[in-house]
Amino acid sequence: MASAAVLAGQPVPLDPSRFAAGSCISFPPTAGNAGKTIYLDAGHGAPDPGAIGVTRSGRTIEEAWETLPVVLDATALLRAAGYQVVVSRTSDSSVVRLRPGDVDDGIFTLSGRHRNLVARVACANLAKASILIGVYFNAAVPQDTGSLTLYDAARPFWPASRRLAKLVQGSVLAALRASGRDIRDDGVHSDVGYGDLLTAADRAYGHLILLGPAKAGYLARPSEMPGALIEPLFITNPTEGTIASSRAGQHAIARGLATAVQRYFASEPGR
């Protein structure tokens, strides 16, 4: 039986015993019912700021600050289109409920960081999402620019993931360009080689935890649905960092994500 909160159209935490307050939250549709659940992962979150960037004005920005409003804007758009949306976090926080040993001197330990990434996958599976999309920003030298989207080719549903990734990449770029921001298209790629490199286990895994396959002793239960992860801008490039931190830029990315989701389901095989 649906909870009173769901029936009233209120956001619902899926498992407060496992996830931090404000994390792994389910939002019902605000209009209609498309019969699908979308999982959106806002990358990073305290105590993990993600990449540190700078705007053209010299203001320092953190990746975790900028992924969240994109996801929340996309959530509102998708709910209005009839989708249930589950988000990894709704504030600048971890996703996993922290325990002793997860944080040291205000930052994640290696084991805590791993637990937090695995918790993002666990939330998507708990939500029984139809698809998942991760929203992150890229980082490198200040001259690097462009948008790329990743999927995992090792999963049994890889054709659906690749189709989703292509739609996400194309729709977000189109929305940014329509808003007057001509961002370079860095393409759609397999996630091999894009995963964490902090430990030997990370390097041996070689995939993104959010998208990748199971591996004994590292990721017991991988994501169970097609997925894509977009890095639409380089937060370390002052021009693109300015876009990433602007409400207009964030909303343009969110519009692209919502468009991609609707196009994905409209073009499902068999429709």
Image (spheres, helix red, strand yellow):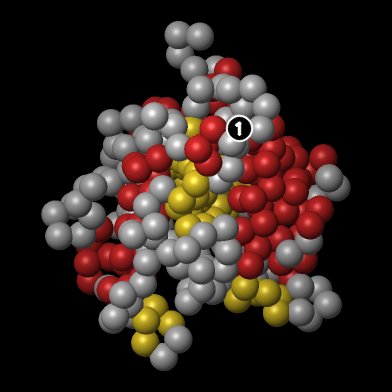
* x and y percentages locating residue 33 in the rendered image: 58, 22
Numbered-mark total: 1
Residue 176 as seen in the image, left or right of residue 226: right
**Residue occupying the point 72% across, 53% down:** 250
Residue 267 in view in this figure: yes
* Secondary structure beneath label 1: loop
Q: Residue at x 53, y 41 (%)?
A: 5
Determine if residue 167 is in view: no
Q: Which is nearer the eye, 261 or 230?
A: 261
Q: Residue at x 41, y 91 (%)?
A: 105
In the rendered view, tell whether residue 162 sits above or below residue 15.
above
Q: Which residue is mark 1?
A: 29
Q: Amino acid at mark 1?
A: Pro
Residue 114, by quadrant, is bottom left
Q: Compared to 175, does 138 lie above or below?
A: below
Residue lying furthest bottom in this view? 105
Q: Residues within 10 Å of mark 1 (few under 14, many from 20)?
A: many
Give percent across and percent down for residue 265.
54, 22
Q: Residue 163 in the image: state x and y as whole percent.
A: 49, 29
Query: Which residue occupies the extreme top position in the image?
Result: 270
In which quadrant of the rendered image does the N terminus lie? top left
Q: Residue 56, located in which quarter of the rendered image? A: bottom right
Residue lying farthest to the front in this orientation: 4
Residue 238 image point, x, y percent: 74, 71
Q: Residue at x 28, y 81 (%)?
A: 101
